[in-house]
Image (cartoon, rainbow, N blue to C red):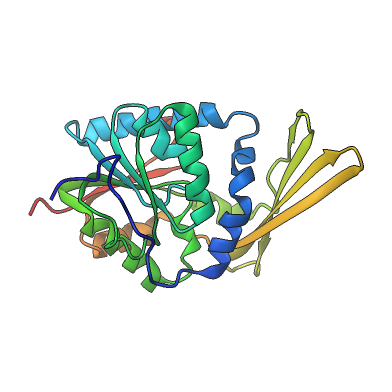
């Protein structure tokens, strides 16, 4: 089989995804770029460059990439603009609709479809590289779901293929347990304020709820939209074990600064045969 090309069709998955995660990203799709302030286009270019460097270092002949948690396309579009044949999938249909629109705006040619990354058998083709960036894996709150997702990713890789995952630095976050992130004020117009709050279940719990508050200035005053979702703070050691148990080798962690990415990045390889 060959990897997906930009013209490949794809049907939505029939399995039932986590409704809270879908609702969160469907609701946030129109505003997700606010996470980057006014610099989402720069993030697309910068993250694409960082991932391209990682891929070239590990698999210089790679051409076909599956981004199985692509959201509105931040990494998928960045890689497509650097010449990769990219297929982006996400659990959120509205995020995929936004990703298609952003790809057209930025002149990127790639395929998109709706899929839960625990069930990637609906994605046509196989790939040199599978990526899941921007803290998607920690939406899975138990070990069984993480194992299922990793097996699904491995099944889409060609022999010797490369897996790339990025997550928050939870080794640090579980010590510091930050209650919030710095607010972002966008000058507009309209002026908008983006606030993120972390509600930890307990002082020793890895589970927490993230709440996004988006305030928008209007002639009648300020409006408020809010979105919430659940995460499990998984650190590098248990995630590395899970990746090994899913059949990957060469599991390596790269510090954010060392690879020019905004989160720590893990790479691993599928078996050669």
In which quadrant is the C terminus drawn? bottom left
Q: Is residue 259 visible in this depiction of the protein?
A: no
Residue at x 59% of width, y 39% of height: 33
Q: Position of residue 177 (x, y in %)?
A: 63, 55
Residues 266 and 27: in front is 27
Left or right: 137 in relation to 183: left
194 relative position to 29: left or right? right
Q: Is residue 122 above or below residue 224?
A: below
Task: Describe residue 248's horizontal placement relative to residue 258 as left or right.
Answer: left
Q: How many marks?
A: 0
State the image coordinates of residue 103 (x, y, percent, origin top left).
45, 34
**Residue depicted at 33% across the width and 67% down the height:** 147
The answer to which of 238 and 71 lies nearer the viewer is: 71
The percent position of residue 208, horizontal first and vertical second, equals: 61, 64
Tell me if residue 246 can be seen. Answer: yes
View extreme (right): residue: 220
Residue drawn 28% across the image and 56% down it: 123
Q: Looking at the image, is 170 positioned above or below residue 45? A: below
Looking at the image, residue 238 lies above or below residue 259? below
- The quadrant in which residue 45 appears is top left
Q: Is residue 215 left or right of residue 44?
A: right
Residue 80 drawn above or below residue 114: above
Residue 113 locus on image (x, y percent): 38, 52
């Amino acid at each position: 089989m060959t990897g997906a090309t930009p013209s490949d069709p794809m049907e939505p998955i029939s399995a039932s995804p986590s409704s809270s995660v879908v609702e969160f990203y469907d609701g946030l799709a129109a505003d997700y770029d606010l996470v980057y302030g006014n610099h989402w286009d720069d993030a697309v270019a910068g993250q694409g460059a960082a991932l391209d460097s990682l891929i070239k270092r590990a698999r210089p002949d790679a051409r076909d990439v599956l981004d199985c948690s692509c959201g509105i396309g931040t990494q998928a579009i960045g890689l497509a603009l650097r010449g990769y044949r990219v297929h982006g999938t996400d659990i959120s249909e509205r995020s995929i609709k936004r990703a298609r629109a952003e790809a057209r705006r930025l002149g990127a040619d790639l395929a998109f479809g709706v899929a839960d990354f625990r069930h990637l058998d609906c994605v046509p083709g196989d790939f040199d590289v599978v990526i899941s960036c921007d803290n998607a894996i920690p939406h899975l709150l138990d070990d069984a779901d993480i194992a299922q997702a990793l097996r699904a990713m491995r099944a889409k890789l060609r022999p010797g293929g490369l897996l790339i995952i990025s997550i928050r630095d939870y080794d640090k976050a579980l010590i510091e347990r930050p209650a919030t992130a710095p607010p972002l004020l966008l000058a507009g117009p309209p002026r908008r304020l983006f606030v993120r709050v972390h509600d930890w279940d307990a002082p020793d719990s890895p589970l927490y709820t993230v709440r996004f508050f988006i305030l928008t200035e209007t002639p009648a005053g300020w409006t408020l939209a809010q979105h919430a979702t659940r995460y499990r703070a998984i650190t590098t050691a248990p995630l590395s074990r899970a990746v090994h148990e899913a059949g990957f080798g060469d599991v390596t962690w790269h510090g954010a600064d060392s690879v020019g990415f905004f989160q720590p990045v893990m790479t691993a390889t599928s078996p050669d045969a």
